[in-house]
Amino acid sequence: MAQVRGTDFALRLYEEDTYGQDPTTPAAVLLYSRGTSLGASQNLQDDPTLAASRTRTEPDKGNIDVTGDIPVTANAQSMAWLVKHALGSVTTGRPVSKQPTNVTGVVVEYAEPTTTSGAGTLTYTATGTLLSWAANGDTAGVGVDVSAGGVFTLQSGTAGEALTVTVSAAGLPVANQSDADISVVAAYEHRFVIGDLPVGLTIEKDYGAAVSGSGRVEKLSGCRVGAATFRFPQEGYPEAVFTLTGAGTALASSGLDATPTDPGHAGFTAFSAAVQEGGATIATLVEADITLNNDLDTDGYVLGGSGTRAQLPEGFATVGGRVRGLFTSAALLQKAVSGTESSLQVDLKRGDGFGTAGNEFCGFTVQQLKYELTGVQIDGPRGVVIDLPFKSYRKGASGGLLVTVRNQISTI
């Protein structure tokens, strides 16, 4: 019998309908990982009964603890499902590759997922402060009063062709204007923000054909993402590590779904990264980490529950991280000393980054943060680096972490 190799191994993900239970209609997604430490452990409990002997009586099983990491090379395909289960909330639309130039004060966020691709027209009417949208090949919908500024959904003449925009009222034109080249791309943009976590995941570890019968597949149910770390080095492949905790385990000879969906895998490299700090490009960072902790309550065992977790609720979502850079100016140090609010954005892309095949995108934005003051360490005569941890927080409608993924996958 041949020894199982890591190259034989496959990892599959299922979204659960009810926590800790097999999905009603199993639909597997193939995960591309660097391996995994995710697994189940179960200790044995000693019986303290005295039986006229120094030899103990037979022990019995204790609680099952499912926990471990799934590390992946950052990508815009299978990683998106793990991001969804790490943050909780996702909005999907079509990306827009051309922003308005004549209708000032308006940023196009995304189009509805069913919007016809190609150039549409954005029109501003000064009388009434109205903004209207006509998708490619369609007539314009009813104008929306945008005088108050904010986020608006503009309906085209046909249902399913809407555009979402953010308006800065002070920047709007003083006269009628239009842009007829707002280009909607035939791809998908998924925006993940912090919200209630999805029900849970079933993860299958398939050890390959070297194992026959029950035991080829280890099924781990009731898994939720307790933490995630996104690491951006100055060379090589950016990495995401998802830490999961689950409820129970079982062995099987095959997976729940014989035909898993393969979303493909195209990893980003560090050389594809673009970094902004405080809204401006920064070229001196050596590396950066962004961390998320969902504060899972792991004590959800119940009497008569056979040692499996009955619940695994989340608490606060805490976002933090660190930046490490060449010490070429005191700008970051000054922010740490004064407690100045800042932000961090790391964008990874292939090609133009608008989501068509070969042009995938994954962006990480810490919307508000403050640096913790730490002393600048001098290690010797060579170049000095500055290393600053940070914490993020909510402010108004935005807070924590925004992850944007563009790809050819319609539903995450």
Image (spheres, rainbow, N blue to C red):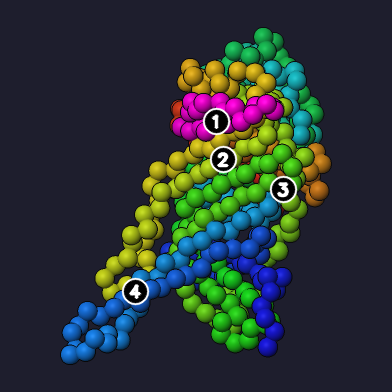
Q: Amino acid at mark 3?
A: Tyr
Residue 166, by quadrant, is: top right
Mark 2 surroundings within 10 Å by alpha-carbon count, few (fewer than 14), some (14 through 19), many (20 or more): many
Q: Amino acid at mark 1?
A: Leu
Question: Secondary structure under badge 2?
Answer: strand
Q: Residue at x 52, y 55 (%)?
A: 243
| Above or below, 91 relative to 278 | below
**Dot 3 corresponds to which residue?**
237
Residue 119, by quadrant, is: top right
Q: Of the numbered discs in the image, which one, if any, rests on residue 203? A: none
Q: Residue at x 56, y 35 (%)?
A: 322
**Dot 1 corresponds to which residue?**
388
Q: Amino acid at mark 2?
A: Ile
Question: Magenta stretch: residue 194 in it?
Answer: no
Mark 1 surroundings within 10 Å by alpha-carbon count, few (fewer than 14), some (14 through 19), many (20 or more): many
Residue contact at pointers 1 and 4, CB within 8 angstroms: no
**Dot 2 corresponds to which residue?**
290
* Disc on the earlier residue, 2 or 3: 3
Q: Which residues are magenta?
A: 367-393
Residue 307: give x, y in percent of width and height. Answer: 35, 72
In the rendered image, the residue lying farthest to the top is 174
Question: Secondary structure under badge 3?
Answer: loop
Residue 272: give x, y in percent of width and height. Answer: 76, 40
Q: Of residues 169 and 156, which is closer to you in this image? A: 169
Question: Magenta stretch: residue 379 in it?
Answer: yes
